[in-house]
Amino acid sequence: EVQLVESGGGLVQPGRSRRLSCAASGFIFGDYAMHWVRQGPGKGLEWVSGISWNGGSIDYADSVKGRFTISRDNAKKSLYLEMNNLRAEDTALYYCVKDEDTAMVGRFEDWGQGTLVTVSS
Amino acid sequence: SSELTQDPAVSVALGQTVRITCQGDNLRTYYASWYQQKPGQAPVLVIYSRNIRPSGIPDRFSGSRSGNTASLTITGAQADDEADYYCLSRDSSHNHLGWVFGGGTKLTVL
């Protein structure tokens, strides 16, 4: 059974940084692209960033480009999101999502339960 | 970035058929996938590619595309289908690597 467990959320002041982690199990982590998707309170889904199986392809939403960095450690079966210069509008539940190919193909069959990031002073 | 437009809310009588649409220029090139989200839960993939249902998704869910519009059709809607539905497709402004969700449609089953 695929399991994706996010951690690292919490209350953070505007302008500060936070690192999210996602621990994967139940599948060969290094065989799949991964993504971060977020959902603000009472809002819709927003794709944040994606990374191919080996990190060779990476992309970001315009709203986070230059502030967020996605990375992965296949040996540790873990996905990360380094978030810098956080803003109030980054407040959201952040989901770790598994794609269904080594490349990003947009087939999001497996989601974690999310970790909540609240940006507030 | 590209945009995908969905109606904010749609309603359907129990047992009837409903179509949820998603419009965007990038849909002329790329298929949409569809996600169902119930309150307090993570989204669930219901349709991907041309019209493929993941294992465990009832066959009353189907997908189609015409021009710049992708559609999710529920034939014989059930009370359990009441949820928010989101489309997802490639963001063609990102050199075909990024992704964009539609704004979501809240489906009410009457």
Image (cartoon, coloured by chain):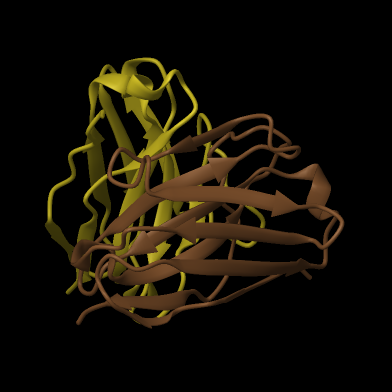
Chain colours: A brown, B yellow
**Side (left or right) of A109 relative to B39:** right
**Side (left or right) of A15 relative to A20:** left
The answer to which quarter of the image holds residue B85 is bottom left
Residue sitting at x 36%, y 74%: B38
Residue B16 appears at what percent x and percent y? Answer: 26, 59
The answer to which quarter of the image holds residue A75 is bottom right
Residue A72 appears at what percent x and percent y? Answer: 69, 51
Residue sitting at x 57%, y 40%: B52
Q: Is residue A29 above or below residue B41?
A: above
Residue B50 appears at what percent x and percent y? Answer: 51, 29
The answer to which quarter of the image holds residue A112 is bottom right
Looking at the rendered image, the quarter that the N terminus of chain B falls into is top left
Could you say which is closer to the camera, residue A73 or residue A96?
A: A73
Residue sitting at x 39%, y 24%: B94
Q: Is residue B15 at least partly visible in the picture?
A: no
Residue sitting at x 66%, y 37%: A52
Residue B24 appears at what percent x and percent y? Answer: 23, 27
Could you say which is closer to the camera, residue A15 or residue A96?
A: A15
What count of labels does the image hold? 0
Q: Is residue A50 above or below residue A111?
A: above
Q: Is residue B76 above or below residue A69?
A: below
Q: Is residue B20 at least partly visible in the picture?
A: yes
Looking at the rendered image, the quarter that the C terminus of chain B falls into is bottom left
